[in-house]
């Protein structure tokens, strides 16, 4: 009998390196939200990629950055915990941004220093190569490998798909022998209600990117499957100020209607059936100091 393989690969890197875009590209569907706003991913998201006899559980992690607030600390701790628990690590680097730096940027240098303390196979993944000249990519790869010796270096574009097959082949080879953890046709671990909340948060940031501060969150209050196969979904958007609530609602409710319409479409696609989405916006001034909100996001609550 052919032996199966299964393991975890943590996708780590600075905010906006393209981890969530890569995750979605590899599994073939949206399992992690993507926005232009930095630090969008707040907790780990698992996507499942099955190729041949090998199952790779990809772990999309929050961006690594110097934490300032309690929520920041929880997110960064979650990312490093996932990295420590994984069978292999893939460091994603925004090739366009890093190629513009002289030497290795301070942000990346700090990540490399801590990665060096984790004794796991590490792959360097230069992303967004469609935006950088080849000679600069080779120079960047040399600089980063001089700072930390990687087992492999890949040059990919998560948007165009360039280089992804080679990356998957190598990650599959790194997975240990063992039984699969998920059915062959499963591509995500998160329950649909969790993904639905993340999709709505994505649409909020897409529409209100420059208006709404970072501290907004969404929770799915109820998910009811109806006899006709559709679902009734009720969600609450939590913000910290009344002024933020007014921004989310928009004049005459136009913003929240547009957000709901966009979210409903993507949630229905993920669910595979029609969705009736009802959004409520509430002010909860200190939600970032509420342990219950952290548990809802899948994060540990930092004591300070």
Image (cartoon, rainbow, N blue to C red):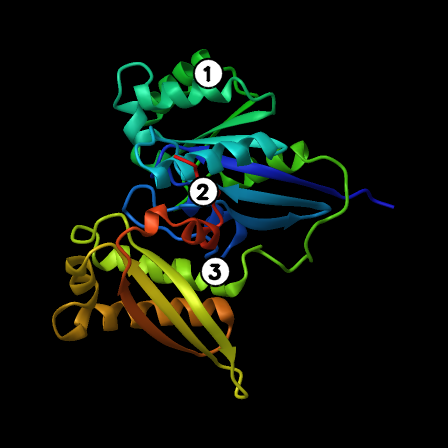
Nearest to N terminus: mark 1 or mark 3 = 1
Establish if 210 lies above or below 168: below
Mark 1 residue element: helix
Nearest the camera: 235 or 282?
Answer: 282
Relative side of 1 to 71, left or right: right
Residue at x-position 76% and y-position 37% = 177
Q: CA distance from mark 3 to mark 2?
A: 19 Å
Q: Which residue is mark 2?
A: 301
Q: How many neighbours does mark 1 have within 10 angstroms: few (below 14), some (14-19), or many (20 or more)?
A: some
Relative side of 88 to 295, left or right: right
Q: CA distance from mark 1 to mark 3?
A: 38 Å
Q: Which residue is mark 3?
A: 194
Instruction: Give percent across and percent down for residue 123.
Output: 53, 27
Q: CA distance from mark 2 to mark 1?
A: 35 Å
Q: Residue furthest top?
A: 146
Foreground label between 3 and 2: 2
Residue at x-position 48% and y-position 73% = 223
Mark 3 residue element: helix
Q: Quadrant of residue 139?
A: top left
Residue at x-position 45% and y-position 44% = 22
Q: Which residue is mark 1?
A: 145
């Amino acid at each position: 009998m052919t032996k199966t393989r299964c393991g975890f690969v943590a996708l780590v890197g600075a905010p906006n390196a393209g981890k969530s875009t890569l995750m979605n590209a590899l599994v073939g569907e949206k399992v992690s939200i993507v926005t232009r706003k930095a630090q969008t991913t707040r907790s780990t998201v698992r996507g499942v990629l099955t190729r041949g006899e090998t199952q790779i559980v990809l772990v999309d992690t929050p961006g690594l950055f110097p934490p300032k607030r309690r929520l920041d600390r929880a997110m960064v701790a979650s990312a490093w915990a996932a990295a420590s628990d994984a069978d292999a690590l893939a460091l994603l680097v925004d090739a366009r941004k890093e190629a513009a730096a002289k030497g290795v940027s301070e942000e990346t240098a700090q990540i490399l220093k801590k990665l060096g303390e984790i004794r796991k196979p590490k792959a360097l993944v230069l992303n967004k190569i469609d935006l950088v000249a080849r000679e600069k990519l080779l120079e960047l790869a040399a600089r980063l490998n001089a700072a930390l010796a990687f087992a492999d270096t890949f040059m990919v574009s998560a948007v165009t798909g360039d280089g992804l097959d080679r990356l998957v082949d190598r990650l599959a080879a790194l997975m240990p022998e063992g039984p699969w953890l998920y059915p062959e046709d499963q591509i995500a671990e998160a329950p649909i209600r969790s993904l639905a909340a993340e999709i709505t948060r994505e649409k909020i940031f897409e529409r209100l990117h420059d208006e709404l501060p970072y501290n907004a969150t969404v929770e799915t209050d109820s998910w009811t499957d109806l006899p006709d196969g559709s679902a009734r979904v009720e969600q609450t958007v939590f913000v910290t100020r009344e002024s933020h609530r007014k921004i989310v609602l928009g004049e005459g409710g136009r913003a929240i209607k547009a957000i709901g319409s966009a979210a409903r479409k993507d949630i229905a696609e993920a669910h595979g059936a029609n969705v009736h989405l009802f959004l409520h916006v509430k002010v909860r001034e200190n939600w970032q100091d509420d342990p219950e909100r952290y548990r809802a996001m899948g994060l540990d609550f930092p004591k300070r």
